[in-house]
């Protein structure tokens, strides 16, 4: 018997078109899966069975007429609770924000494009408060666990989305990424995620973290992410910084087998100039790169010409902490008391930065962008580990006993490329000594989203990418 919750979006729509599977059956299975995993892993802020089944029935009728609304008609989708979704409150993980009486009439741009395409919205997924850190726990919704080991973290800040996708509660999810927030949980949870070039997917309302924040697809593989990106990468007048349409669908960039890797000039940077990487993570990612080379890529081991990472981290934190201070600027004492204690610390630090501090960080960011632009004249892709570690304990910002203080200290491979606005993907490439997923990080030049997706798809096609499904998924309804 087919596990409906294990099918990709492309497999679902192919079967809808053939008439041998109903969107209603799929929605029912996905909702049952969501109910089963929620007490164990906690990926959802809420689910909407009534709304999802109504959308699924409408999709079923369209497919029966041979007139689907779009390429994801009838496909179950989840949305991170940072993004507006019509008919529901957007709480952003914060107990300091009241749910309010509604009517909640507006969709974020990416959500609107999915609705137009007939997607079935299962519910909204968990986030740390305002997406401020690289793990997912919040005063509003508690901590989200890892699909492979629920006592470990899912990562963040799109941890609920990653866990939902990994466990079969919808094959597609929308996440946001301001410093690694789709790629971190994708690496920890064994799924695929893409942070597109900044502006590729419009964002509204604008993020308090400014042009660090991207909207990106989280899926089981690169082909589904490409499908989702084709749906959501359309201009929206509410975002003045959106990019013009690319002209050619991203799905047309995908090629079979190893063709997507042949001749690619790849820079392999295992430590980005000195990051301490866990030995098992280092071994798994190096093996993946060796296989990439065997499939025809031209691999050179070298580091990108970025400033020293401590300087990059300091600049990122100036930008990030200032954004956190801005988003909470008008909170009263009661609201501040309800905040995540770690966020209060970050807000306090951000409020102490002045305009010259902020502009100095912007200057460094511009220099990094120039350096990476020159680097990609020589190399098509930069490849690193996504993270230097596998998932650690649930409900803490840094690994216990590590001596670290902030999440930015264990994510040195991700946030630099928010500063440069480049497309970057995390591809699962194996498991560490603890049996938990490890991610391989593919970074392209600005606007080279199609190239990143093509290479990632080739890794799936050739068996380099992918990890076994979590045992929890195999024992849940629908399996």
Image: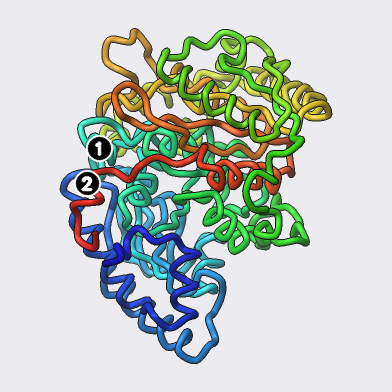
**Relative vertical location of residue 243 with respect to residue 273 in this rendering, above or below:** below
Q: In the rendered view, does 168 fall on the left or right side of 83? A: left
Tell me the number on the disc at residue 347.
none
Q: Position of residue 332 (x, y in %)?
A: 34, 37
Question: Relative to residue 54, is residue 174 depicted above or below?
Answer: above
Residue holding disc 1: 143
Which numbered disc, 2 or 1, marks the residue closer to the eye?
A: 2
**Colour setting:** rainbow
Q: Is residue 399 left or right of residue 457?
A: left
Give the residue displayed 31% in from the left and 18% down from the top.
Answer: 399
Give the left or right position of residue 19, taking residue 48 as reference. Answer: right
For disc 2, the marked residue is 472
Residue located at (44% from left, 54% from top): 173
**407, 227: nearer the viewer:** 227
Q: Residue shown at 43%/43% (left/top)?
A: 191
Which element carries disc 1, helix, strand or loop? strand
- Where's residue 433, x and y in %? 32, 21
Determine the residue located farthest toward the bottom in the rendered image: 65
Query: Image quarter for residue 329?
Result: top left
**Measured along the vertical axis of the image, is residue 97 above or below residue 301?**
below
Q: Earlier in the sequence, mark 2 or mark 1?
A: 1
Front one among 377 and 221? 221
Q: Is residue 328 visible?
A: no
Quarter holding the C terminus?
A: bottom left
Callout 2–callout 1 Cβ contact below 8 Å? no
**Residue 227 visible (yes or no):** yes
| Label 2: which secondary element | helix
């Amino acid at each position: 018997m087919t596990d409906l919750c294990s099918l990709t979006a492309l497999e679902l729509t192919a079967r809808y078109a053939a008439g041998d599977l109903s969107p209603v059956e799929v929605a029912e299975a996905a909702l049952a899966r969501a109910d089963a995993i929620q007490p164990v892993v906690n990926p959802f802020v809420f689910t909407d069975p009534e709304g999802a089944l109504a959308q699924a029935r409408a999709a079923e009728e369209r497919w029966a007429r041979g007139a689907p609304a779009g390429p994801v008609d009838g496909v179950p989708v989840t949305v991170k609770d940072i993004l507006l979704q019509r008919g529901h409150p957007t709480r952003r993980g914060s107990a300091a924000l009241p749910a309010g009486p509604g009517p909640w009439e507006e969709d974020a741009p990416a959500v609107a494009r999915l609705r137009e395409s007939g997607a079935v919205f299962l519910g909204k997924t968990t986030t740390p408060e305002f997406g401020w850190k690289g793990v997912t726990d919040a005063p509003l919704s508690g901590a989200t666990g890892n699909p492979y080991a629920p006592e470990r973290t899912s990562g963040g800040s799109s941890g609920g989305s990653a866990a939902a996708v990994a466990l079969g509660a919808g094959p597609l999810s929308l996440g946001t990424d301001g410093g690694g927030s789709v790629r971190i949980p994708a690496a920890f949870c064994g799924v695929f995620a893409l942070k597109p070039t900044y502006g590729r997917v419009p964002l509204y309302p604008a993020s308090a973290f400014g042009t660090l924040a991207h909207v990106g697809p989280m899926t089981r593989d690169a082909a589904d992410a490409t499908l989702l990106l084709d749906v959501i990468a359309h201009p929206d007048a509410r975002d003045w910084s959106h990019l013009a349409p690319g002209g050619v669908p991203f799905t047309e960039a995908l090629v079979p087998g190893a063709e997507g890797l042949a001749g690619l000039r790849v820079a392999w940077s295992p430590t980005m100039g000195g990051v301490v990487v866990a030995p098992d993570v280092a071994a798994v990612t190096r093996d993946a790169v060796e296989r990439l080379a065997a499939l025809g890529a031209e691999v050179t081991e070298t580091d990108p010409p970025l400033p020293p990472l401590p300087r990059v981290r300091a600049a990122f934190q100036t930008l990030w902490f200032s954004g956190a201070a801005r988003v909470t600027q008008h909170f009263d004492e009661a609201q501040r008391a309800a905040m995540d204690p770690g966020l209060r610390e970050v807000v306090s630090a951000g409020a102490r930065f002045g305009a010259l501090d902020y502009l100095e960080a912007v200057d460094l960011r511009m220099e990094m962008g120039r350096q990476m632009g020159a680097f990609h004249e020589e190399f098509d892709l930069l490849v690193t580990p996504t993270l230097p570690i596998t998932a650690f304990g649930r409900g803490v910002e840094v690994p216990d006993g590590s001596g670290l203080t902030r999440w930015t200290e264990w994510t040195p491979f991700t946030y630099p490329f928010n500063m440069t606005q480049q497309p970057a993907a995390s591809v699962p490439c194996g498991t560490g000594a603890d049996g938990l997923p490890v991610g391989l990080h593919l970074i392209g030049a600005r606007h080279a989203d199609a190239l990143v997706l093509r290479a990632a798809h080739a890794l799936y096609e050739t068996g380099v990418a992918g990890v076994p499904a979590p045992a929890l998924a195999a024992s849940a309804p629908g399996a």
